[in-house]
Amino acid sequence: MRDLRDLAGLLLGFMPWLLFLFLSGHTLASLERGIIISLVVSVVFGLRGLWRGFILQWGTLIFFSAAFVLVNIMETVWVAENMGILTNSFLAGLMWFTLIIGRPFALQYARAALPKEQWHNPGLIRSGRFITIVWAVLMTISAAVSVFRKADIVSLPDWVYFDISLLIIISGLAYTTFYRRKKRMDREGMQSPNN
């Protein structure tokens, strides 16, 4: 049950990005609609994270606010045409940024589910940093795939790129869930009176 709760918390953090992936489509109208919906969702579902100062939530809000201004209001064609690269690069950069400033985004989510006296546990900090690195690498790969797509070196159908992006996100969610479960089982095994 705890694994589902942890996964739900992480999914809420990524909800605007997932919706954008599914809704942005291939037309300017679908892109504008995807931006509006993702912006609204980033506020509605991310309100708690915004109040807690979660960097992923704030970065998401900033990104979709800027996208709304640049695409929906100012009609900046270059931004609309390069949204795939911009989206993935921003998300990857945001994750690397949280590592550089010493506030890994995964650690913020982990701490939210734990009592305050456990927040400075070295194992927790190491795990939060490691999971954030995995996500940053995955999003960097996703950004590279977007650049590859835009360069049009090999002409592949759009669904291939969509599936790759989705697979990368699912891989990150699955890895995070399994990693957390393994760490929790290791801790519980060490605390068992039979050991």
Image (spheres, rainbow, N blue to C red):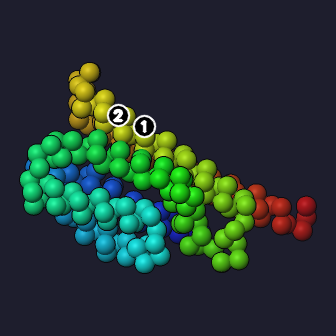
From what the image shows, is residue 99 above or below residue 162? Answer: below
Q: Residues within 10 Å of mark 1 (few under 14, many from 20)?
A: some
Question: Picture coordinates of residue 65 (x, y %)?
Answer: 24, 64
Residue drawn 26% across the image and 37% down it: 159
The quadrant of the rendering that contains the N terminus is bottom right
SS for tag 2? helix
Q: Would you say 71 lies left or right of 1 here? A: left
- The reply to whether residue 35 is in sight is no
Question: Picture coordinates of residue 195 (x, y %)?
Answer: 91, 61
Residue drawn 27% across the image and 31% down it: 149
Question: Picture coordinates of residue 168 (x, y %)?
Answer: 43, 43
- Give amino acid for label 2: Val
- Residue nearer the viewer, 181 or 17: 17
Q: Would you say 109 lies left or right of 155 here? A: right
From what the image shows, is residue 84 above or below residue 110? Answer: above
Circles 2 and 1: CB distance less than 8 Å?
yes
From what the image shows, is residue 148 above or below residue 101? Answer: above
Q: Residues within 10 Å of mark 2 (few under 14, many from 20)?
A: some
Residue drawn 47% across the image and 76% down it: 52
Q: Would you say 59 lies left or right of 37 here? A: right
Residue drawn 14% across the image and 54% down it: 71
Asked which quadrant contains residue 56, the reply is: bottom left
- Give amino acid for label 1: Ile
As drawn, the label of residue 141 is: 1
As drawn, the label of residue 145 is: 2
